[in-house]
Image (cartoon, helix red, strand yellow):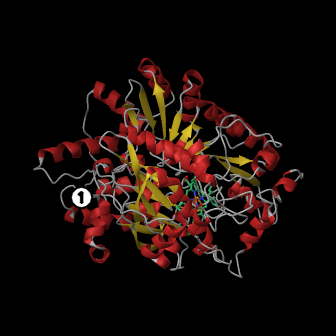
Amino acid sequence: MVTTPVSEPKVSKVEGIKERSHGLREPVATELLQDTTHFSEDAIQILKFHGSYQQDNRDNRVKGQEKDYQFMLRTRNPGGFVPPELYLALDRLSETYGNHTLRVTTRQGFQIHGILKKNLKTVVADIVNHMGSTLGACGDINRNVMAPPAPYKNRQDYLYAQEYADNIADLLAPRTGAYYEIWLDGEKAITAEPKPEVLEALQRNGNGTLIADNEEPLYGTHYMPRKFKCCVTVPGDNSVDLFSQDVSLVVLTNAQGELEGFNVYAGGGLGRTHNKEETFARVADPIGYVDKADVYDLVKAILATQRDYGDRANRRHARMKYLLHDWGVEKFRAKVEEYFGQPIKPFRPLPEFKYFDYLGWHEQGDGKLFLGISIENGRVKDEGSFQLKTALREIEQKFMLPMRLTASQNLVIYEIDPANQAEIQEILDRCGIRKETEIDPLVRYSMACPALPTCGLAITESERTLPSILDRIRAVLVKVGLRNEHFIVRMTGCPNGCARPYLAELGFVGQSPEAYQIWLGACPNQTRLAEPYLDNMPIADLETTLEPLFMCFKKNRKRNESFGNFCNRFGFDALREFAATYEPIVSRGKARYRVGIYDDLYGKLKANAAEQGKPMTELVNALIEDYLKSQEPQEPQESQDPQESN
Ligand code: SRM
Ligand code: SF4
């Protein structure tokens, strides 16, 4: 039996706020009724547990005037599952009460931004009444549990991963009645109760995992020291960035495809603070294997270890990754075993992990189809000829199809009758939604966090600037002769790492206004951390910084080697040395020569240039260059698809 340690005498301010909240009720309940534009500091902290952040539109800040307060709401969708009724409700709510956009998050949730305080209750209630929830989407508690979004019906392992993501989400959900009291006037919405096996596991008090006489038997009055993140995946599928999570489970089946148990990783996490070496990104360690019958007890044991031993004094040192770092895996495992009540079995061998984004049309294994739609930086919006929000609304209103959001800020629509494929594709084409094959792979495999203007912690732009940065990166690649190259680029507006830049092959991390830290050397399947290559690069220096790196890559890469793997192998010192003596390619200047082309070709070229938003001269030059290159002896192959590499 584990004795819960006596809490440290000095704890952070947030611990007191949680203690005084009466199970996440106050001061939110009282202040929600007040005719004000915003909440107090204490209420803001508790509001997070209900799935909402108080923000202000930073574009509208005027010195001496009240901030333009608004609220972000985040949904909790285990495995990214969104029923059609919920999607249509979110779409409507974002139009009526939000900023007319929806945002798919890097943890398979949706966010609505721009809600006024007076409308918050209406919006939360509407979400809950349409089979959704925001409870536990934020705060010091278990967050949305991730799982691969592929809706394969003939892959039992994927079905288990999604089932257990739901079950772990139920197991670790808060038990307080505060959510329904505050947002639904005490009426409990009709939600599926956890399965009996999950309820039973929840009530089992193995060796001190539960706290006696508490409305929150698993969390206690103070909840977790900090956020807690889990995922469930299948061997080989790293569509969920499993190395960045506090706890990752990998489904293991027998030869008949029946579930045997799970491999368990723990201690991943990405958040850091600039110039504070004691904060760092960390990849999760393998902890061991657990039989399916014991998986809930093991997850509870890990949670209880972090709950009781995580740092409650310093919030910058409070994530479970620091416990693993400070203790080492052996001590951590031994403590978990005390709560678990038995030794943890050895980790089982796994195949190599790969990254999948599930875009495009696929068979789902039972005759029906699924379609993965690329969403740049997760922002579902209508803008000019690009009408994604309209397209999804039309598809959902007509066909009522379930969705799964992906960890790469995209979405998958499934259960599509093949008879409806053409009509769905027609809606997307009419609304200007490009197929995954028509998108520059640099864009397809990139992610940016929201940053400005909604995120209060942003130092730089991210979502709003990444599209133009990717154009500039593409131009540099073209300049050095790597026209078809691509790799994983991720950007965040601060070091917290919400778009997981430390697992990208080229990561941009906002450091000071208009300047980014550059991270290099992670791999296309996100199993190795990147490292900082350069501090505070003014974004104006993007081209001069990247050109030598790309040229060095071109000259020294091995066959099929990806940019991230190259940087890691070649080494940062050698890269810097190359850059120091690099002579930039002199720009070609203006196009000068005139060549005639036939009328019919000119018409087609003009239409194509308009479609791509590129000048005709650029297209013609690119085509001629490609043609001339095709006449030269072959170079080693340049392009590598992250889905087929490590
Ligand atoms: Fe995050 C805080 C957005 C995934 C690490 N994150 C925030 C806040 C709420 C800013 C704040 O505290 O005021 C951001 C709201 C911005 C806005 O305007 O919407 C924010 N985080 C996001 C989202 C929306 C980014 C996105 O592009 O999708 C993601 C929401 C996921 C979800 O549905 O739950 C999001 N955040 C992540 C991830 C990635 C992940 O979980 O897979 C990380 C890194 C992994 C990790 O946790 O270690 C992440 N967010 C943070 C941190 C640093 C935590 C730490 O351990 O130090 C903060 C700041 C904090 O907690 O103090 C933060
Ligand atoms: Fe905000 Fe930083 Fe997260 Fe970006 S990484 S959303 S700037 S907290």
Answer left or right for 224 relative to 41. left
Residue lying at the far left of the rendered structure: 633
Is 256 placed above or below 461 here? above
In the image, residue 466 lies at what x, y percent?
49, 54
Q: Is residue 274 above or below residue 221?
A: below
Which residue extends farthest top? Answer: 419
Whether label 1 lies within 8 Å of ligand 1 gets the answer: no
**Which residue is painted at 82% across and 63% down in the image?**
40
Q: Where's the C terminus, which quadrant?
A: bottom left
The spot of residue 125 in percent (x, y) is 75, 40
The quarter of the displayed image where residue 503 is located: bottom left
Question: With respect to residue 415, does 313 lie above or below?
Answer: below
The residue indicated by pointer 1 is 561
Query: 151 left or right of 399?
Result: left
Viewer-nearest residue: 133 or 545: 133
Check disc 1 and report its element: helix, strand or loop: loop
Task: Determine the quadrant in which ligand 2 lies.
Answer: bottom right
Tag 1: amino acid: Glu
Return the x and y of residue 92 as percentages of the image width and height: 68, 34
Marker count (numbered): 1
Does residue 108 appear left or right of residue 330 in this picture? Answer: right
Q: Would you identify the image quadrant in which residue 436 lies?
A: top left
Q: Is residue 344 left or right of residue 177?
A: left
Viewer-proximal residue among 418 and 555: 418
Mark yes or no: residue 90 visible.
Answer: yes
The quarter of the picture where residue 78 lies is top right
Mark 1 Cα within 10 Å, few/some/many (few <14, many 20+)? some
Query: Residue at position x 12%, y 50% from top?
Result: 634
Quarter of the picture holding the N terminus: bottom right
Asked whether the viewer can see residue 229, the reply is: no
Tell me residue 193's x, y (percent): 65, 40
- The residue at 52%/63% (across/down) is 497
